[in-house]
Amino acid sequence: MQHQRLPLQSLHQIYERLGQVKNISKGGLLFEYMADENYRNPVESELEIDIFISRDSFYLSKIPCKIIRDSQVVPNHSMITSIRMRQCGIQFKDLDLEAAHLLDALLHRCEPLH
């Protein structure tokens, strides 16, 4: 029996930048991602991002925001010379009530231990 074949987009087409959140607050977040050595995020550009955390099954989509900084992370020792780690600072913009509530719930779960 043959199964139906469906078209599939690559992750690169679906997710322009996939990275690890380094810190987050009500005002925005900083995330780290891999990029080739020539890539730059356009600072001051406005966009929508998705935040998902697999271990908590948390997903918040289409958060309006603005890129406020994007810079290369100083490498420790990388064997792959064409790939660089970068950090991108994002400022949240005009969150609706539901998004603000979900973000508050996420921040409450992520409170640092003292």
Image (cartoon, rainbow, N blue to C red):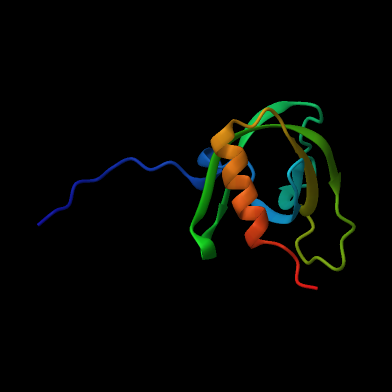
What residue lies at 86% left-to-right and 54% top-to-bottom? 73
Q: How many numbered discs sit on the rendered protein?
A: 0
What residue lies at 33% left-to-right and 40% top-to-bottom? 7
Q: Is residue 78 visible?
A: yes
Provide residue 78's location: percent of width, then percent of height: 81, 65
Provide residue 80's location: percent of width, then percent of height: 75, 61
Q: Quadrant of residue 101?
A: top right
Above-or-below relation of 79 to 8:
below
Is residue 19 found left or right of 99 in the rendered image?
right
What residue lies at 56% left-to-right and 42% top-to-bottom? 15
Above-or-below relation of 80 to 113:
above
* Quadrant containing the C terminus in the rendered view: bottom right
Provide residue 32's location: percent of width, then percent of height: 75, 53
* Quadrant containing the N terminus in the rendered view: bottom left
* Extreme residue in the bottom direction: 114
Q: Quadrant of residue 16?
A: top right
Residue in front for this viewpoint, 114 or 34: 114
Provide residue 113's location: percent of width, then percent of height: 75, 72
Residue in front for this viewpoint, 56 or 72: 56
